[in-house]
Amino acid sequence: MRLRDRTIIAGVSVIAVVLLALFLSGTVSLSVRLPTATNQVATSKTSASFQISILAGQSDSRWLRGAANDTPEYATAVNWSVCNAGPLIANNTSVLVRSEGAVVGHELFPLPANACHDGKVDLRYSYETATHRVAIEAFSGGSGANKSVAIDVALPRILLEPGTAPSPELFEFAKLFITPNDPVIKQKVKELFQGDQYAFLCPHGPPDPKCPDWMVLDAIEAWVEYYVKSTGLVSVYAGSRLLAGDEIVQVPRETLQSEKGNDFDKALLVVSLARAAGIRSDKIFVVVGTNGTTGTGWVYDKVDRRVPHLTNWHQPPWCQCSDYGYVFHPACCPKSEGCRSDVCGLLYTWAVYYFNDEVAEMAT
């Protein structure tokens, strides 16, 4: 090898050693340009892919008889629609429906892009409760939404609005105020005929062939009249308020527990107790009447009696005359036999419809 070639090789070697020393010391850096990769699972991308929203509302609301205690229950449905406005399918979309914190509905489903999924939850609430809040939550991946629906459970307590004709819906609703299968009512019947006062009438308790219906009914009516304090035209439920002349009513267990009630309340309690004692539905009713301004109620029965009952079909019992003298009431009818028009004034009460837990018809 020539001297010139050896010199070149030696020079190159020295340069290489110098460069390597500089690189290792960090003075010189080497960079390589690589292709840029797209991150498909970035959070921002996920939230942009799923856009969940909720619409919700209430429907199919009505009052029904409760299976547990025979008292009114509010039945309703909450309808919801969950939508995905994003460009990608939202797999495993979850919807939770809660009422008072308890889960009452849950669904899991895939939700395509630009599509909606509808659902429904049926709910029932006791008449004794107030406002309930139902919460609907939906989520998928990094996107979610929530919505709430307020359900107002307020029992209507008017069985007649003077000046209006009762509707078929009112007939069905009125039946809910006769509660013969309420455990509270059944227990009172048991106590009534096992106590010292009436045990001699029905030693084995009604129904009993040796204890006829008229005897059972007379005992019930006497007990209610004695123990339930009359509040006149004012319902215990309304306190001291009169609602535009409409007489509001109580569920029989409320009258029983408070031992206070108006004419409607007493009649509803008597018929509920009588039905619980075994008197048939074609034998006893609550009659709803009016004088054109105020509604009122009384008991009418068709039970067989040794002595004819003083109450007739179209007039309240307080308008009748008995062997003990006149029975006066501010809503009695001056045209009824024996009633004194100078005491009753010009007020006139007539029957509009009658009902119990199974029957409701117009009075004819």
Image: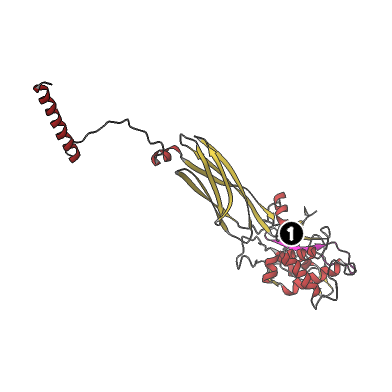
Q: Main secondary structure of the magenta part?
A: loop
- Tell me the magenta residue range: 293-311
Residue at 46 percent across and 40 percent down: it is: 51
Which residue ends up furthest to the bottom in the rendered image?
196
- The N terminus: image quadrant: top left
Q: Is 328 situated left or right of 91 in this image?
A: right
- In front here: 34 or 258? 34
Find residue 247 and report its image quarter: bottom right
| Position above or below: 162 against 82 | below
Label 1 residue SS:
strand
The kind of residue on which mark 1 rests is Val
Q: Is 276 situated left or right of 254 in this image?
A: right
Give x and y (percent) for residue 302.
Answer: 85, 61
> Can residue 15 be found in the magenta stretch?
no
Give x and y (percent) for residue 206.
Answer: 84, 68
Give x and y (percent) for residue 294.
Answer: 68, 61
- In front here: 281 or 57? 57
The colour scheme used here is secondary structure
Give x and y (percent) for residue 313.
Answer: 81, 60
| Position above or below: 89 against 310 | above
Residue at 85 percent across and 70 percent down: it is: 215
| Position above or below: 83 against 131 | above
**Residue 345 visible in the snapshot:** no
Which residue ends up furthest to the front in the rendered image?
1
> Can residue 303 be found in the magenta stretch?
yes
**Residue 216 visible in the snapshot:** yes
Find residue 324 and report its image quarter: bottom right
Find residue 323 and report its image quarter: bottom right
- In front here: 285 or 103? 103
Disc 1 marks which residue?
Answer: 288
Which residue ends up furthest to the top in the rendered image?
2
Question: Callout 1: 10 Å neighbours few (<14), some, many (20+)?
Answer: many
